[in-house]
Image (cartoon, rainbow, N blue to C red):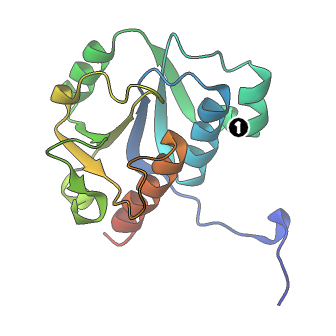
Amino acid sequence: MKQLTHNEIDNKQQKFPITIVCDAIRTPENIGMCFRIAESFGVEKIYIHENSIGLENRKVKKTARNTIHQIEHERYGDFNKLISNLKNDGVFIVGLEITDKSKKIQDFDFKKYPRTALIVGSERNGISDVNLLDQSVAIPMYGKNSSMNVIHSLAIALYEITNQLDKF
């Protein structure tokens, strides 16, 4: 067995009809990792709140590892307006959030929707207004802790979503 280098790996490069909305995520490392993970899973676009740290930040750049230039992104100011615009464009809005209506992520059929926006909330407060969501999904947890880092959750969610869509 031999460990492969980056140059020896030939990924099946493709885009999925997934948009990520970062709802007021503030930690530079989380913004950078959002780009890195989103690019790895073929996400079409990322929306970042205007109050989030700038993409020129050293920690953002370091964790993103040049993926900022590889994925379309846009800043927004009004969360409610952005969600409304996405819905008007036919995008199904899914929040990665623990609510009383959340479905287990693996039980939600992402193939039913041609375009999906995955909303991830701030590190402290979660998603600003869960009532704007078409659906909320949650990752089952088996320890005592009820939540995990937003970017770890994003990685798990994108794995599940792209796994479903890739088989479609």
User: In the image, is residue 152 above or below residue 54?
Assistant: below
In this orientation, which residue lies closer to the viewer: 37 or 28? 28
Q: Is residue 52 visible?
A: yes
Q: Could you tell me which residue is drawn at 51 percent across and 52 percent down? A: 155
In this orientation, which residue lies closer to the viewer: 54 or 97? 97
83 with respect to 48 (left or right): left
Which three-letter amino acid code belongs to the residue tagged 1?
Answer: Ala
User: In the image, is residue 61 above or below residue 115?
Assistant: above
Q: Quadrant of residue 36?
A: top right
In this orientation, which residue lies closer to the viewer: 124 or 139? 124
Q: Could you tell me which residue is drawn at 26 percent across and 13 percent down? A: 81
- Residue 41 place in picture, x, y as percent: 53, 54
Looking at the image, the residue that sits furthest to the bottom is: 1
**How many neighbours does mark 1 have within 10 angstroms: few (below 14), some (14-19), or many (20 or more)?**
many
In this orientation, which residue lies closer to the viewer: 7 or 151? 151
The quarter in which the C terminus is drawn is bottom left
- Residue 68 place in picture, x, y as percent: 66, 32
80 with respect to 20 (left or right): left
Q: Could you tell me which residue is drawn at 41 percent across and 67 percent down? A: 163
Secondary structure beneath dot 1 equals helix
Q: Could you tell me which residue is drawn at 37 percent across and 58 percent down? A: 161
User: In the image, is residue 60 above or below residue 147?
Assistant: above
Q: Quadrant of residue 97?
A: top left
Count of number-bearing discs? 1
Name the residue beneath numbered marker 1: 64
Q: Is residue 66 visible?
A: no
Q: Quadrant of residue 104?
A: bottom left
157 with respect to 48 (left or right): left
User: In the image, is residue 129 above or below residue 2?
Assistant: above
The quarter in which the N terminus is drawn is bottom right
